[in-house]
Image (cartoon, helix red, strand yellow):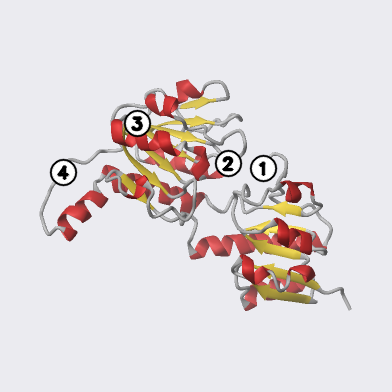
Amino acid sequence: MAEEITILSWYEIDADTRKQLEAFHPNLRVHHAPTVEDLEPWIAEADIVLHGRFSDDLLRRAAKLRWYQSVSAGVDKLLTEDFISSDVLLTNASGNHPISVSEHAFALLLAMTRRIINSYGENNLLDTWQRRECVELYGKTLGVLGMGNVGREIARKGSAFGMKVRGYDPRPAFLPYLKEMYLSGQIEAFFSGLDVLIVAAASTPETKGIVNGHLISLMNKGSYLVNIARGPLVVEEALIEALEQGPLAGAGLDVFDQEPLPADSMLRSLPNVALTPHLAGQTPRYRERVLTVFVENFRRWVQGESLINVVDKHLGF
């Protein structure tokens, strides 16, 4: 009989997915572990973890762990020194976010430019009828910081709105819907004259704090910033100052330096901020896509083939 493989999964593995997995290795034990605490009773037995959280304490106890499949593309919170130096193979869910996250980016942007949040507060909660001028996206200059899978889809959608789209990334991306592409050393030129900035870069030591007060000051007066990447990419103090004093007219944020966002955060009290609790990728279709990647990677793992979306733990992506 084949050696038993133990999988700890953030998602509850449905019967169809389990059948697919068992087609490649019939002797499976699967435990549903939606929280870090749920991992603890089984971690010593785990061969594979499909999850989004971990800790050095769990890693020390995971004597059998050989592969960690992240349910997200960003793995910055996993990459402690101990995890980086371990022999555990790390794969991520890159390529599964573009649709849901790019849609959410524009939902946040439109909530501000079309005055949806302000109108709801004024007209629904205060029982008034205030009509205010809105902002069109057509013809505006959109800068997409980070031209990975999500950034490319954001750029495509921006072009569909009739925006003039710029991209910034250390690696060149020449796409038909990009008007301009900026590389390392050209970040000031990239920021200069932007009407909208959408942050979509990976979180690495090099990108931490990349969106600072000086660069924001280069954007046009009345501009907008959306962050659907990671909170630490944007210097929060500089963002708040730019929202209060200009040039930003508004910000749409799905990610923050500290999550959950503290109750006393100034971002909660500013009238020109749209906040969501890191849910841009939370759709049923996203779960389906992640499990599809996991099943394919499981097949490859069992059969000794190279896995897809392997993360260089030293680079962070």
Q: Is residue 154 above or below residue 64?
A: above
Q: Give yes or no for contact between labels 2 and 1 (Cβ–Cβ under 8 Å).
A: yes
Amino acid bearing label 3: Asp
Is residue 197 at all visible to an observer of this figure? no
Tell me how far mark 1 sits from mark 4, CA to CA.
44 Å
Relative horizontal placement of residue 54, taking residue 262 as reference (left or right): right
| Location of mark 3 (residue) | 195
Q: How many numbered marks are there?
A: 4
Label 2 SS = loop
The amino acid type found where label 2 is placed reads Ala
**For the residues bearing labels 1 and 3, Cβ distance under 8 angstroms:** no
Query: Dot 4 corresponds to which residue?
Result: 132
- Give the alpha-carbon distance from disc 2 to disc 1, as whole Å: 8 Å
Q: Which residue is mark 1?
A: 316
The residue to which callout 2 is attached is: 202
Local crowd size for mark 2, using a 10 Å CA cut-off: few (<14), some (14–19), many (≥20): many
Q: Position of residue 194 (x, y in %)?
A: 38, 28
Q: Disc 2 vs disc 4: Cβ atoms closer than 8 Å?
A: no
Q: Quadrant of the N terminus?
A: bottom right
Residue at x-position 54% and y-position 37%: 147
Report the mark closest to the observer, 1 or 4.
1
